[in-house]
Image (cartoon, helix red, strand yellow):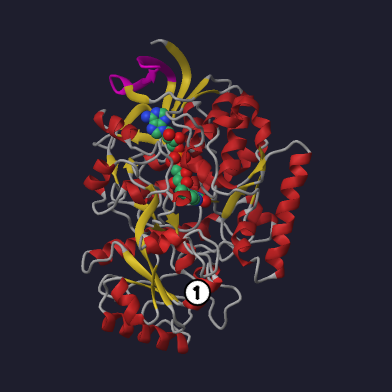
Amino acid sequence: MAEQFDFVIVGSGGGSMCAALVLRAAGKTVLVLEKTELVGGTTAISGGVMWIPANRYMREDGIADDAAKATAYLDAVVGDAHDAPGATPARRRAYIEQAPRMVDYLVEQGIALRRVPSWPDYCAAPGESEPGRTVVSELFDLNELGQWKESLRPGFLPLPAYLEEAMQLPDMKRTWAAKKILLKLIGRTLGSRLRGKHLCSAGQALQGQMLHAALKAGAEVRIESPVTDLVREGNRVTGVVVNAGGAQQRIGARLGVLINAGGFSRNQAMLDQYIPGTSTAWTKTAPGDTGEMIQAAAAHGAALAQMDQRVGNPMALPPDAANAEPAVVQGDLAKPHSIVVDQTGQRYMREANSYVEICKAMLARNAVAPATPSWLIFDSRFIATYPLAGNMRGAKKPDVWYEKGFLKKGESLAELAAACSLDAAALEATVARFNTLVAQNRDEDFGRGDHVYDNWLGDALHEPSQTLGSIEEGPFFAIQVFPGDVSTFGGLVTDEHARVLDEQGAVIEGLYATGTSTASVMGSGCPGAGASIGPSFTWGFVAANHAVGNAPD
Ligand SMILES: Cc1cc2nc3c(=O)[nH]c(=O)nc-3n(C[C@H](O)[C@H](O)[C@H](O)COP(=O)(O)OP(=O)(O)OC[C@H]3O[C@@H](n4cnc5c(N)ncnc54)[C@H](O)[C@@H]3O)c2cc1C
């Protein structure tokens, strides 16, 4: 081996620095190898929310929760999961036990965290939490990273806003509360710059803090260092092969290797094999989400499972250059005066459901009627009041949206149907039915608005329902909506110590995995916000503790 470390971590995702901190606290050497030129993975560009049952911040705020309640809820969401080896009862219990400990550990290490005041769990099931079980990062000063500042992957928020603040900003022309938030943000930005700070938020702040802490603790982090293979001696993984400036180099790992290299949302061949009908063009994941470490471990006998699972998120594909990326439209779908229809003009889903369920519904519908893409149909009140595909509210949209046919418009529903190549009678009937449901303030067909979460992303100022509003004031509009994603959710099968298992269910010694490289502990369910990053951090923590021999207490 060219070099030896106690522990080698592949990828700089959610759980990586968390594991590195545990290793360093135990006095072990640790190397983090990141393929791209930027540290942080999709975690850095995310909201940075972690789903952590019975966490310390809930306790501080007097919100009742405990392991039994969380277990009842998770079991209801995940189901018996007989075909989901990543979500065994033992793994679920371990997650619920270890996730709050992981958060306590991070706090002891100086990581500044908090909770989002309100983010309801996603499912109507026993044990659900209406305030939610979120843990997020405090704002972080990027300047603390010194020379590493430019090597942290940028986040999705241009302003140093907490998530609950960012969510209210689109209402700044409608409410004083939102105006006050904007002023506060401007003051915060200018004030911090005057004090020599460069604040960031959400996933970037989380990963910034983690990188800062890991470097300070003495972890070694290398960028532009793609791992191409594992070194296996007998039944033990003893290191990795890394491409170091064009040369293949073997690096030894005495205690183990942790794979935290993301999923395969950007690998079309793997999507075609495991999640047919989806596309790399619809993903918001970081560029490194190409799945080769899942394949490399599988080539060494690691079992794969739940490969058809994903963290779906509905996306639109606006054509303007500033928006070359897909735009997340989940919030758009929950707003009043809109519905989603398939290409036959039929409504088929609860549009204000969680992003994961929306995309599942789209793919399932596509098996019986063309629904990828579907159409988001809305009226003039919608376009005047709410943001659309990342663009601020108001009917004035970029010209290119109309020129390229991204935004369709019709003075009547029939005209809109023609612009979208939909059957006019079918669309008119669907809208008429929806308007009847709105009039009785009850979506008997799909239950939109029945769960507290549906209203959470709706319009707080809209009455009587925050998500149900008729579609009747022309002109009418439509955009196409795709079942995009923010991660895949299947991969290496791991046990309750985050050890990778082989096809026979035996442990591959020295090999651990976490994050979206693994078959998720959530099975095919999604209990609430943070169901990806919470587990990534937690299993990284669990793996590192196992590797250094810290017995779980
Ligand atoms: C806009 C947005 C918002 C989101 N918000 C949330 C949220 O709030 N909460 C939540 O739970 N989920 C959220 N998600 C999803 C979530 O961000 C991801 O599922 C999660 O961050 C994946 O984390 P990870 O630790 O598995 O890997 P990642 O954070 O993606 O890190 C994997 C890293 O491994 C590197 N890598 C890959 N292959 C190799 C290799 N061969 N060698 C070396 N390095 C390699 C990659 O380049 C990458 O840097 C969001 C996603 C998006 C896009």
Relative image position of residue 255 (x, y in whole percent): 44, 22
Above/below status of 51 relative to 402: above
Above/below status of 34 relative to 128: above
Picture quarter with the C terminus: top right
Q: Quadrant of ligand 1?
A: top left
Amino acid type shown at disc 1:
Phe
Give the residues drawn in magenta, as a range: 231-254
Picture residue at 37% right of the left edge, 25% below the top: 227
Q: Nearer the viewer, residue 283 or 14?
A: 283
Residue 145 visible in rendering = yes
Residue 108 located left or right of residue 191: left
Picture residue at 45% right of the left edge, 13% below the top: 4
Above/below status of 159 relative to 109: below
Q: Nearer the viewer, residue 518 or 151?
A: 151
Picture quarter with the N terminus: top left
Number of numbered callouts drawn: 1
Reading the image, the residue beneath label 1 is: 382
Picture residue at 50% right of the left edge, 33% below the top: 16
Residue 170 located left or right of residue 499: right
Mark 1 lies on a secondary structure that is helix
